Amino acid sequence: MTVRTGLDRIAHDSEVNTLVRGRSIGLVAHPASVTATLVHAKDVLAGAGANIRALFGPEHGYGGEAQDMIGVEDARDPETNAPIRSLYGATFDSLSPAPAWLEGLDALVVDLQDVGSRYYTFVWTAVLCARVCQRAGVELIVLDRPNPLGGLTIEGAPQLEKLRSFVGLRSVPVRHGLTIGEIVADAAKDEGLDCVRVVKMQGWTRDMLFEDTGLPWVLPSPNMPTVDTARVYPGGCLLEGTNASEGRGCTRPFEVFGAPWLDARALAAAMMRDGGAGFIARPTTVRPTFHKWAGQTIGAVQVHGTDARAFSPYRAYIAALREMKKHPQFHWRTEKYEFVDDVPAIDLLTGDGRVREAIDQGAGVDELMAIGRERLEAYDHRAKWLYDPR
């Protein structure tokens, strides 16, 4: 049976689509905001009788064209003439809708495909929208979607509160095991946001990988082309905090990564030795067409998943960072990262500066994984569940 997303329930359940029928609606969406038959949310809501007054695009834009950390301009939808408001500009304030944009709306609908990693910003766009909607007296309706990594496994400690940012506005594990609806509902509970309503999925259980849902994969951002990309991302995104290429400009971003100075064979061997089970690291070479090391042939590793339920991407890529740090040309990113310019990007990503410091000091992978373990063990994953774990 194909899982019914929140959007599919709006499309097919006459009782559920009363949430939007005859109402003035704003829609936060991107290219992956589609039904099981690939009908976009804008068309579904219009077909359900909603009056779509405004469209909003998260990072990468409503159309999904922009690369990472590129500001997106406002536009206008050629089909409906509705304004397309950007929720990703040059400042942190640009990440939230302006209150004036919500005037005249009965509800703001959020339909965004998340990928199960704290760094992926769409869940935080939804939380920021909920906060503004609460102040504006506008209902926020989250159309829930599967976590493509499943909902049982968590890894990577919740970040320290002082390291919250747009790659983690709330302290959750790196691989958080929650759906976007669960994260927003949890924020609503903690922050008293009674404007939030989640349209739950039907047929989704926490042990499901994305392949089990029967749903089509549509890339939710330019460098998330496949489910395999999402699977490595809890580890692969750590490379954004370094001068190594995370594979942007290649056809398998985050699965493939490297640098001109990299000893790919040694790195692959180190990952296989220390990175856990469920994958094979293969040495190779690539030539990124843009981003880091564009136009240069670089030593690289490709991570091939062999057992999705055994694979711990965070550990695997921590092992990679530890090995790469041995090279004198490796360094941590110091440039501004997701609107923060006074903290190393790797600290925002791991959520604890001690990880960077321990890598610099040559700590082993088990030692690195132990940093923040008390926060991970204290994190009450199950208390946030909206779905039966069976």
Image (cartoon, helix red, strand yellow):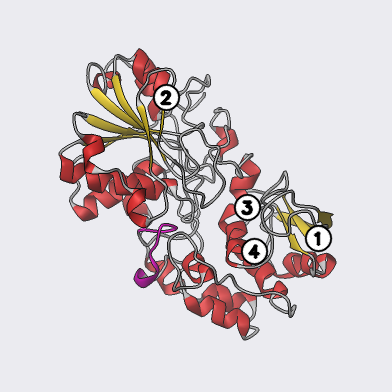
Q: Is residue 182 left or right of residue 232?
A: left
* Distance from the alpha carbon under mark 1 to that under mark 3: 20 Å
Q: Amino acid at mark 3?
A: Val
Segment tinted magenta in the rendering: 161-169
Q: Is residue 309 visible?
A: no
Q: Which residue is mark 3?
A: 232
* Distance from the alpha carbon under mark 4 to that under mark 2: 40 Å
* Distance from the alpha carbon under mark 3 to that under mark 4: 9 Å
* Distance from the alpha carbon under mark 2 to that under mark 1: 41 Å
Give the label on residue 77, or none.
2
Instruction: Indicate the secondary structure of the residue bearing disc 2.
Output: loop
State yes or no: residue 164 in magenta.
yes
Looking at the image, residue 316 lies above or below residue 218: below
Answer yes or no: do the residues labelled 1 and 3 have beta carbons within 8 Å? no
Tell me if mark 1 has few (under 14), some (14-19) or many (20+) residues whose alpha carbon lies within 10 angstroms of its own: many
Q: Amino acid at mark 4?
A: Tyr
Which quadrant would residue 27 be assigned to in this image? top left
Magenta stretch: dominant SS? loop
User: Residue drawn at (49%, 57%), measured in percent from left and top?
Assistant: 154
